[in-house]
Image (spheres, helix red, strand yellow):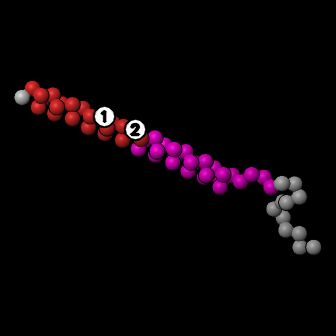
Amino acid sequence: MNTDLSTNLLTAQTALTQNSVQIAVFKKAHEMESNLLNSLMQTALNPPAPPPGQGLKIDKQA
């Protein structure tokens, strides 16, 4: 009887630990995806300045 109880407690503790690890991994993956999305949005909304000689005006005299 005692071994059954201790086995059940060990199984429950293992499941709890595994669940906690899964939640931590999911949160970290979500955080990394959010950081990547924010970085891409910053780049898209604030593009870098064009190199000299390649401005935004179109020269129609060429």
| Residue count near mark 2 (Cα–Cα under 10 Å), binned few <14, some 14–19, many ≥20 | few
Quadrant assignment, res 18? top left
Q: Is residue 49 left or right of residue 3?
A: right
Nearer the observer, 9 or 53:
9
Query: Can you say which quadrant of the picture contains the N terminus?
Result: top left
The disc at residue 29 is none
Nearer the observer, 56 or 30:
30
| Residue count near mark 1 (Cα–Cα under 10 Å), binned few <14, some 14–19, many ≥20 | few
Q: Is residue 24 above or below residue 52?
A: above
Amino acid on which the number 1 mark rests in the picture: Thr
Q: Is residue 12 left or right of residue 41?
A: left
Tell which residue pokes out farthest to the left in this image: 1
Residue 32 screen position, x and y as percent = 51, 44
Q: Main secondary structure of the magenta part?
A: helix
Instruction: Please report the bounds of the magenta region as a residue range.
Output: 26-50
Residue 41 screen position, x and y as percent = 60, 52
Residue 35 screen position, x and y as percent = 55, 45
Q: CA distance from mark 2 to mark 1?
A: 11 Å
Amino acid on which the number 2 mark rests in the picture: Ala
Which residue is at 48% across, 43% downward? 31
Q: Which residue is under mark 1?
A: 17
Residue 8 screen position, x and y as percent = 16, 33
Which residue is at 74% across, 51% downward? 48
Query: Would residue 49 be counted in the magenta stretch?
Result: yes
Q: Secondary structure at mark 1?
A: helix
- Disc nearest the viewer among 2 and 1: 1
